[in-house]
């Protein structure tokens, strides 16, 4: 299972990854999305984020939930959007094996050098969400290349 962590951006990344791998049988990809805090647990996705991924043709249902150490154990790969998420996820456990599952989503974006964070577009114009979608799509392209090698 691939778990994507963060509130605003992870449902978008989950939507892209789930849609792009929906017909895969090997490796079978199960996508989960969880925030690193409990602020929005039980709520649906951020409306501008959902509008952006749906305008791009992605379908995905999401109800916010929180990342836990148990979820980490069930996941093969945990993708985070920024340093704060990275720190928060690692703080859930001292288990170094579980820490090894945690990566920045943009570690797989081979078109960039430097900063690997996905910026948070929350409360910004729709164009910021569209920019983030582009970042997410490029990173997922790289991730899928890695998974099919």
Image (cartoon, grey):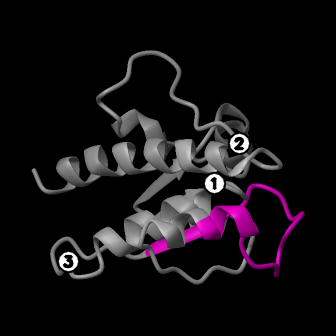
Using the rendered image of the protein, determine whether residue 100 is visible from the camera's viewpoint.
no
User: In the rendered image of this protein, does residue 44 appear above or below residue 50?
Assistant: below
Query: Label 1: few (<14), some or many (≥20) within 10 Å?
Result: many
Q: Is residue 51 left or right of residue 79?
A: right
Q: Could you give the CA–CA distance between mark 2 and mark 1, rounded to whole angstroms? A: 7 Å
Mark 2 or mark 3: which comes first in sequence? 3
Q: Is residue 50 magenta?
A: yes
Query: Residue 69 location, x and y as percent?
Result: 66, 62
Q: Nearer the viewer, residue 107 or 135?
A: 135
The residue labelled by disc 3 is 24
Location of residue 68 (image quadrant): bottom right
The secondary element bearing badge 1 is classed as loop
The total number of labels drawn is 3
Query: Label 3: few (<14), some or many (≥20) within 10 Å?
Result: few
The residue stretch that appears in magenta: 31-51
Query: Residue 86 location, x and y as percent?
Result: 64, 39
At x 36%, y 74%, the residue is 19
At x 72%, y 58%, the residue is 7
The secondary element bearing badge 3 is classed as loop
The residue labelled by disc 1 is 9
Location of residue 76 (image quadrant): bottom left
Q: Nearer the viewer, residue 40 or 147?
A: 40
Query: Residue 92 location, x and y as percent?
Result: 72, 52
Q: Nearer the viewer, mark 2 or mark 3?
A: 2
Could you tell me if the residues under marks 2 and 1 are in contact, i.e. CB atoms within 8 Å?
Answer: yes
Q: Could you give the CA–CA distance between mark 2 and mark 3, rounded to whole angstroms? A: 30 Å
At x 44%, y 65%, the residue is 56
Q: Is residue 87 magenta?
A: no
The residue labelled by disc 2 is 120
Q: Nearer the viewer, residue 45 or 75?
A: 45
Mark 3 or mark 1: which comes first in sequence? 1
């Amino acid at each position: 299972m691939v778990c994507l962590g963060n509130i605003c951006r992870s449902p978008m990344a989950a939507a892209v990854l789930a849609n792009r791998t929906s017909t895969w049988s090997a490796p079978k990809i199960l996508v989960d999305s969880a925030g690193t805090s409990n602020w929005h647990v039980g709520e649906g996705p951020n409306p501008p984020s959902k509008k952006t991924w749906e305008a791009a043709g992605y379908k995905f249902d999401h109800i916010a939930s929180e990342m836990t150490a148990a979820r980490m154990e069930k996941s093969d790969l945990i993708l985070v959007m920024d340093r704060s998420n990275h720190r928060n996820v690692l703080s859930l456990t001292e288990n170094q094996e579980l820490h090894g599952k945690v990566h920045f989503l943009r570690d797989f974006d081979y078109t960039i050098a430097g900063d690997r964070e996905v910026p948070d577009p929350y409360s910004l114009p729709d164009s910021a969400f569209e920019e983030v979608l582009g970042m997410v799509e490029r990173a997922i392209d790289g991730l899928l290349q890695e998974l099919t090698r």
